[in-house]
Image (tube, rainbow, N blue to C red):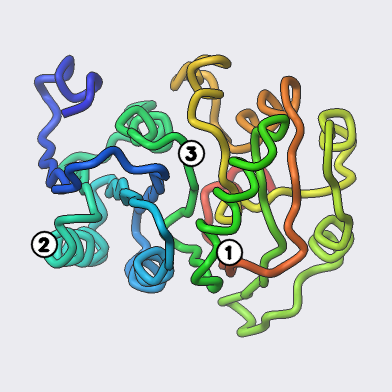
Amino acid sequence: MNEFIKKSQKVEVKEYPNQVKNEPLVSVCVQAYQHVNFIKDCLEGILMQKTNFEFEILLRDDASTDGTAEICKDYASKYPDLINLLAYEENQFSQDVRPFIDNVRRARGKYIALCEGDDYWTDPYKLQKQADFLKANPEYGMVYSNVKYVDVVNAEITPSKYHRVRQSALKNGYMFYDYLKGNFSIMTNTVLFRADLIKTLGLIDTKKWFIYDVWLYQRIMMVTKIYKFKKIMGCYIDTSNSVTKNNFI
């Protein structure tokens, strides 16, 4: 049980720990909330990964009421050797608890991969390729890739002009200032980074930071190189009711 849960006696939460005996090389953090139409694709994309190492799936549901919670529990019971489910009975985001920060504290892997519950992976060798690159290139701290954009509102796959411009650029090396200028974008479901960067940089103050991935990538790029794979490794689901669109766009 993570430290946040230990300190909070008012929160009703159930944890379904996985049964991986050895230390996983990669921890995949999946944050889910009201993702009933997408969570199966998300989990299947992770479960299909072909690797020569062990990985764990840290699945966290923030008290979904649309059926997502039930799907998460079903998958956790089917794959107890891979999935570690943290299932809240009371929504924590509304209480200023940031899902990623709460979830990543549980990670045991040397590398951390991210995939929100409404996105999914399409390349069965995503984890293997990315982990191999970081092993062979210690000067790089994070990798990412191209994605396919799926507009569920208009049933389209063609990305917007904004996404086309930023995804077409191949950005490698020390890219902090380029990222600040908006010269390229990093889609969260394609990322893999070194877990020790979390300790080096420190975790986000959960009451101050809203969009965790932007902050995280900026901090990582301040201290290390990043590398982009040209290959499309996943799908980004573009919805009209996402947290970021409702609050920032």
Measured Cα–Cα span from mark 3 to mark 1 = 31 Å
Residue where numbered disc 1 is placed: 240
Residue 75 appears in which quarter of the rendering? bottom left
- Classify 249 as above or below 201: below
Q: Residue at x 36, y 71 (%)?
A: 44
For label 1, the SS is loop
Mark 2 surroundings within 10 Å by alpha-carbon count, few (fewer than 14), some (14 through 19), many (20 or more): some
Closer to the N terminus: mark 2 or mark 1?
2
- Seen in the image, is 46 located left or right of residue 237? left
Q: Identify which residue, 211 or 23, lies in the foreground.
A: 23
Q: Position of residue 50 (x, y in %)?
A: 43, 67
Measured Cα–Cα span from mark 2 to mark 3 = 25 Å
Q: What amino acid does circle 2 point to? A: Ser
For label 3, the SS is strand
Task: In the rendered structure, find residue 111 and report the number of the disc placed on it.
Answer: 3
- Number of the front mark, 3 or 1: 3
- Classify 119 as above or below 211: below
Furthest residue to the bottom? 155
Q: Which residue is drawn at 32% across and 51% down?
A: 57
Mark 1 surroundings within 10 Å by alpha-carbon count, few (fewer than 14), some (14 through 19), many (20 or more): few
Q: Which residue is drawn at 18% across and 63% down?
A: 79
Q: Position of residue 156 (x, y in %)?
A: 67, 83
Q: What amino acid does circle 3 point to? A: Tyr
Q: Verify CB contact (< 8 Å) between mark 2 and mark 1.
A: no
Q: Identify which residue, 103 or 38, lies in the foreground.
A: 103
- Seen in the image, is 167 located left or right of residue 60? right
- Classify 224 as above or below 186: above
- Number of the front mark, 2 or 3: 3
- The reply to whether residue 19 is visible in this rendering is yes
Residue 227 appears in which quarter of the rendering? top right
